[in-house]
Amino acid sequence: RSDIIGKSIYCYSRTKSFSYSGFSCASFILQADVACERIFTVNDVEHGGCKYGIINLSGLGKESLTVEMYDNLYFTNRKVNSVCWASLTHPDSHLCLMGIAETPGCASLLPASLFSSTNPGDRPGMLCSFKISTAWSCAWCLNPQADNCFSTGLTRRVLVTNVVTGHRQTFGTSSDVLAQQFATQTPMLYNGCRSGEIFSIDVRQRNRKGQSWKAIRFFHDSAVTSIRLLEDEHYLMAADMAGKIKLWDLRTAKCVKQYKGHHNEYAILPLHVNEEEGLLTAGGLTFSPLFVDCMAVILLCLRSVS
């Protein structure tokens, strides 16, 4: 688990912990890779842009960590709203970065090796880049039926791009898409909106007019800021700006549990479920994050539907 406090990053595991205070400005995006060996960071700089870097956790437990910073030529002076790791040539080989429209907006897929200090003269170039309106979220698809695709959650639309063929699909929505996650067992994309709606898209289908392409729909009472599919992909966790965290059964589109104690009023805050799905962690506007033992709840739900 990673926390941002001021200009320092604190990371915790079952056996080790560390803090890194080397940033000259506050970090506001942290994104760990699947293996939890690297953390991609985005932090503000004084002139109004962003600086990007990768913290290599191989130094965990040693006197100092390896922090690789790189002045990204493609995103110089550009703010970043959302980041996700992409597995194109190998697991977590690339990074998707979504820039804010006013700076101007840009979606780029960059090799993670750009942030490496080794062989600086032999760095691969950007794989794809295109202009966008304000992007609120992004997600990479690991299902082979939608191979090499990533999604961008925009203002009132979802854009799915195949980075190899360049083919794009656009799905119009009635609200800004603030959170996204692809399923792995099926080519389904789950989306959480400012309106409180959560819906899924089968990305194999072609663009359709209206809302007929939505496979599943259910609602929170406030803007959905984070969603997490559980491993069996029958359940989805969702957090909103009212501070509510709910566990949804995707087979019935019904809420089976609401977790209390989370505090939020306006921010897009992260929601995490650990690998064993025994602990739910949510960042809040208070200094105390929320920890919930969710395994007992999930087991109870599984028994009730079996």
Image (spheres, rainbow, N blue to C red):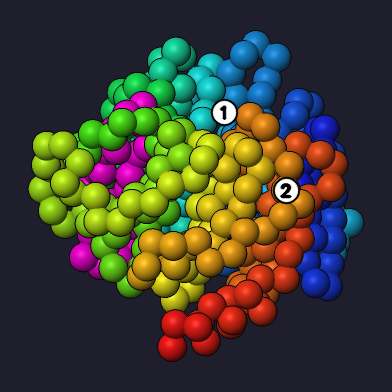
Q: How many marks?
A: 2
| SS label for mark 1 | loop
Image quarter in which the C terminus is found:
bottom left
Q: Is residue 111 left or right of residue 275?
A: left
Q: Earlier in the sequence, mark 2 or mark 1?
A: 1
Residue tagged 2: 262
Residue 65 visible to the viewer: no
Residue 48 visible to the viewer: yes
Residue tagged 1: 71
Q: Is residue 220 left or right of residue 106?
A: right
Residue at x-position 58% and y-position 18%: 49
Magenta highlight on residue 153: yes
**Image position, residue 115 (x, y; %):** 55, 42
Image quarter in which the N terminus is found:
bottom right
> As shown in the figure, which amino acid type bears the numbered disc 1?
Asp
144 or 92: nearer the viewer? 144
157 or 162: nearer the viewer? 157
**Image position, residue 269 (x, y; %):** 63, 41
Q: Residues within 10 Å of mark 1 (few under 14, many from 20)?
A: some
**Image position, residue 136 (x, y; %):** 45, 33
**Image position, residue 304 (x, y; %):** 50, 83
Magenta highlight on residue 138: no
Q: Are marks 2 and 1 in contact (CB under 8 Å)?
A: no
160 or 97: nearer the viewer? 160
| SS label for mark 2 | loop
In this picture, which residue range is highlighted in magenta? Answer: 140-162
Q: Is residue 192 above or below residue 36?
A: above
Residue at x-position 59% and y-position 81%: 300
> As shown in the figure, which amino acid type bears the numbered disc 2?
His
Mark 2 against mark 1, which lies toward the viewer? 2
Which of the 4 image quarters holds residue 175? top left
Which of the 4 image quarters holds residue 184? bottom left
